[in-house]
Amino acid sequence: MTISMVPKDREPGKNKFPWLRLGLTIGDPAGIGPEILIKALAKRELLPLGAYLIFSPPSLLEAEAKALKVKLKLYSFADWEKAKGPGFFLFPLETSGEWAEKGRASAVAGQISFQAFSEAFLMAQQGLLEGIVTAPVSKLSWALAGIPWHGHTEYLENFYPEAIMAFWSRRLRVALFTHHLPLVEAQKKITRENLINFFRRLESSLNRFYGRRLECLVAGLNPHAGEDGLLGEEENKEIVPAITEVRQMGLSFSGPYPPDVIFRQALDRRDCLVVALYHDQGLIAFKLVSFADGVNLTLGLPFVRTSPDHGTAFDIAGKGMASEKSMVAAIRLAHRMAARLTS
């Protein structure tokens, strides 16, 4: 099987938008990132037309394609720079020649995945890509490689402090007020001032990326959303005043709602998004209903960034078992939102 979306001249009037340019990163080579990327490219009939630039060491991609029995044909980066139409292109990364062992975190794997991501990020920052789609990385591999960030979102926050981690699927949408923090630290962030700032940034970013207003349901922190102070004071002291203030500004936020029922209220409602106050509060529910096709989305950037909603899955890496559904969904969402930004 040959994967090749052949470049061709643009046909005026055939498409609403010019060809969009999306960067696709290889992720941790010891995990399932290369596998799901190649499998996604093989489902080219499911992908929107665009100029896709794949960031990977050529030998790594070739070895993975061979193991999957997929004949991979990519056009060169030089061709991408002058592309007038859609296609799959390779941005070749140089490596030390060391090989990353499948199913195991390592400094080599961390360095390759970070290099792919940082190169794609730089091009997006310079306006050369409308969006990037990142395959999963390992926090441990990055740490072993001496990379000081825990993951993609933390790196992006270093440049764009207003970045927001969100998760998107057909059935449910969730934005996280805090994400990769110990629970005790996340609780300290729940203040009226911080919440107001977050709500304003979230609404602004949703309007820009999504193109329509969503009703944002805010989860409480405590059981029963505090039961009017009987089970905790955070709702009355911090969360309710923040929601009241932004509603007076005309923003579409309500709550706080009990965390054990809020996701039922939002499920299968395309006009609705849940604001979860900490990582697992939002992700347990999201991954329960949307693990196979959910997408991690970073809001608050000048370009689009999406990723599959799962991790490196070291336990099945190299076995050909990984599903590409979430990767395909991430590419489709990135293209759709990038089209919105450029319209």
Image: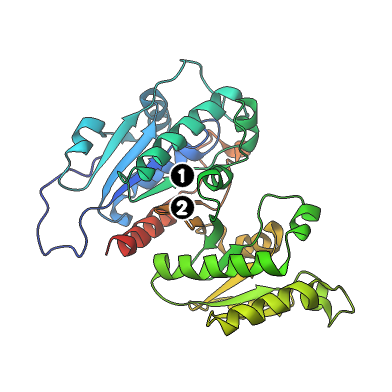
Q: Say which quarter of the image contains residue 304.
A: bottom left
Give the number of callouts: 2
| SS for dot 1 | strand
In this figure, which residue is indicated by the disc labeled 1? 134
- First in sequence, mark 2 or 1: give its number: 1
Task: Say which of 339 and 9 sits in front.
Answer: 339
Amino acid, disc 2: Thr
> Dots 2 and 1: beta carbons under 8 Å?
yes
Residue 286: percent from the left, percent from the top?
A: 61, 63
Identified at 58% across, 64% down, the residue is 175
Question: Is 47 positioned to the left or the right of 319 in the image?
Answer: left
Residue pointed to by mark 2: 306
Task: Classify 85 as above or below 280.
Answer: above
Q: Is residue 2 visible?
A: no
Q: Position of residue 41 (x, y in %)?
A: 34, 44
Q: Secondary structure at mark 2?
A: strand
The reply, left or right, for residue 129 in relation to residue 208 is left
Disc assigned to residue 233: none
Q: Which class describes the residues within 10 Å of circle 2: few (<14), some (14-19), or many (20+)? A: many
Instruction: State the residue at coordinates (38%, 44%).
Output: 125
Q: Quadrant of the N terminus?
A: top left
What amino acid is labelled 1 in the image? Answer: Thr
Cα separation, mark 2 vs mark 1, equals 6 Å
Residue 156, placed above or below residue 263 = above
In the displayed structure, 27 sits above or below 229; it is above
| Image position, residue 70 (x, y; %) | 34, 35
Q: Is residue 337 above or below residue 237?
A: above
Estimate the x, y position of residue 290 in percent, counting from the top left: 56, 62
